[in-house]
Image (cartoon, grey):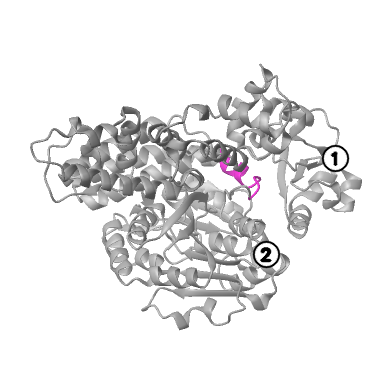
Amino acid sequence: MKTWREEVLEKFIHIPYSLLLVNDPDFLLNDEQILQQLRSTGYEVVHFHDSIFTRYLYETQFRERVEQDELRLLIYSNETEETCFPYDFLQQGYHIRLHIRDLFPKFSAAVVRQLDKDDFDGLYAAHKSYQGSNSDKETLEYIVKHVYKIPYELIDSKVELYKMLLSIHYEKKQLPQKVQEFLIEKLAERNELKGMPVKRLLMSTSYFFQYIEKRWVEFVQQLSALEKDLILEESAFYLAHPFSNPDVRRLMNDLFTEGYIRKAKIDVIRSFPSWMKSGIEIEKEDSMEEKLRHLYDKIVEQIPAASRYKDWLHMMEWMAEYKCTILEANKREYEEEAYTLFQQVNGAFEQWMMTNYRSLTSLPPIPKPKMVHHIVQFLAAKRAQNEKIALLVMDGMSYVQWKRIKHDLENKGFTFEEHGVFAWVPTLTSVSRQAIFSGHFPSVFSQSIHTTAKEENYWKTFWENNGVLKQYVSYQKGLGKDRYKKEEIAAFRRPSIKIYGAVIDSIDRFIHGAVQGEKSLMSELQLWLHTDYLAQLLADLHDAKFTIYITSDHGNTESVGIGRISEGGLAEQKGERVRIYDDVVLWQDAAKKINGIPWQGAGLPKDYYALLAPYGQAFVHKNERIVSHGSISIEEVIVPFIRVIAH
């Protein structure tokens, strides 16, 4: 049976033009597999979001080859009208429109437009047997049941509500807003759910986990308070509680072992049912071992199935939780097992990066950013009128360090929405951080690719091009070194500031001073967190009505030296996992002599060639152990993108 992707790709067959312009207002090309298939048939794909940027790419990289029919270039825009494209492009090229109603004519286009492309396979199959009208109401009723498999009419108790919510949030289902609103309306009719914050529980994953954690602590404490000689499983309180349901407690177990919710701490020792022990802090060592075993098995199981960028984002979350637990346990046998596991993951990730990373550069920045240069584009697209935005870039912060930071901030009342994004390769500050503040590929800032001196100018120029005058935009770097002082934060110097960008480089300093590897890095990080610098900054930004985002330019990984090499420059003193060349012959020669990974990925300047160190290795003195960055390990490439929800 034909797939929805094949139906889209059919529109690009047998087109005798070297320049193809596509209006895709329904984001049908926001799909890795389609972009990879287009590339395999000879297309170079560029997402059009900025006319100046696209013109620059066209003139510097594509014009000559397109005009000589040596390259087929597909430029697509998410705008509705073809007038978004330059006039000379339209004169020279062939124009196509993609519409969601051509794929799903029987459904409401307004509803389908909101669905995640990952749900389109099920939607396409369900569409074949649909007999209803294309109204929003009938479309929603059908897809909620047949695509999302949510039997909303059967949710008439807290148990059924918990089961639905646990499934949605644990499995990271991206429910469209219209689907959420539909479910909220239906559930509001249930008397059994009166008084529950159903809307927030459904719409916010962070709020749901926070809510369920509080209910769990209350459940454990109330059971602890029951009479000593009472069998807990036979008590009326236990039997009536949603947590006693087998389906609910099975899902709860995974939340504890994967770190989504914290265990309850108790003072009274009781004979709890065995299933509850995964959620109670009793024997810390046994509990830690169980958690590590669960995460290890989950990661190993998922390696062969990881084929999309989202699969690797999930993988990084599990690996970060696993590594954090390993560092906390501080046991040699765990560390050896972790190294072997991370080697296995990175072997698969490296292969995926070599084949698929290029496609990420052609994806749009919404509904969610995929790469770090998408972040500022995403913020501009989502920003409400007069909304104040603060973007804090934690230089060098990996997902592992974020887990530790998150735990500290949660204890101080903060909650978060989390997502992962891909850094630019090579994973160097001057490459990836400039991409964040400029919103561009590194090839656009080729003149400053070895420095970060122009970041402020790039940041202010981007926002000016998006309707915010420079006097309302602030930039600051070098934060986090001393005690926190509100008067030193540029966001608060003038009440007119609407956009604030800042670099907190504490972690990067800890990385380059980590003489005992990741352990000393995490120790330094913990000491820094005790100063409350970050918590106070977030609280003050929140009080000043900023919408706050946190991200990183690249992560880091522990490596062992394989020996220094003389040729090639280091883009940073401590970027020892990459060598940079400006001569292709020297680069190719070095790649033959050195055990490295030659990288000339999409989006880099013309004369910028990178030789990357393999996983666990660095171009430093033999056997020297360091924490560094620059290469393509999953710990360096995938970084968190966080929205601070509440304080």
Left or right for 234, reference 522: left
Q: Tag 2: Cα neighbours inside 10 Å, few (<14), some, or many (≥20)?
A: few
> Helix or strand or loop: what does disc 1 sit on?
strand
Q: Tag 1: Cα neighbours inside 10 Å, few (<14), some, or many (≥20)?
A: some
Query: Residue at point 68% right, 20% down?
Result: 130
> Helix or strand or loop: what does disc 2 sit on?
loop
Where is residue 15 shown, x and y percent of the image?
A: 83, 32
Q: Report the residue that reaches farthest toward the left.
A: 229
Disc 2 to disc 1, C-alpha distance: 33 Å
The residue closer to the viewer here, 440 or 379, is: 379
Point out which mark residue 385 bears. Answer: 2
Query: Residue at point 75% right, 41% down?
Result: 24
Q: Which residue is mark 1?
A: 95
Mark nearer the N terminus (2 vs 1):
1
Where is residue 360 shown, x and y percent of the image?
A: 60, 44
The C terminus: image quadrant: bottom left
Residue 239 visible in the displayed image: yes
Question: What's the amino acid at mark 2?
Answer: Gln
Q: Is residue 346 magenta?
A: no
Left or right for 580, reference 235: right
Question: What's the amino acid at mark 1?
Answer: His
Q: Nearer the viewer, mark 2 or mark 1?
A: 2
The residue closer to the viewer here, 167 or 555, is: 167
Left or right for 18, reference 389: right
Residue 171 visible in the displayed image: no
Range drawn in magenta? 356-365
Q: Report the residue that reaches farthest toward the right.
A: 91
Image quadrant where residue 486 sits: bottom left
Point out which mark residue 411 bears. Answer: none
Where is residue 443 shown, x and y percent of the image?
A: 65, 58
Where is residue 413 shown, x and y percent of the image?
A: 37, 61
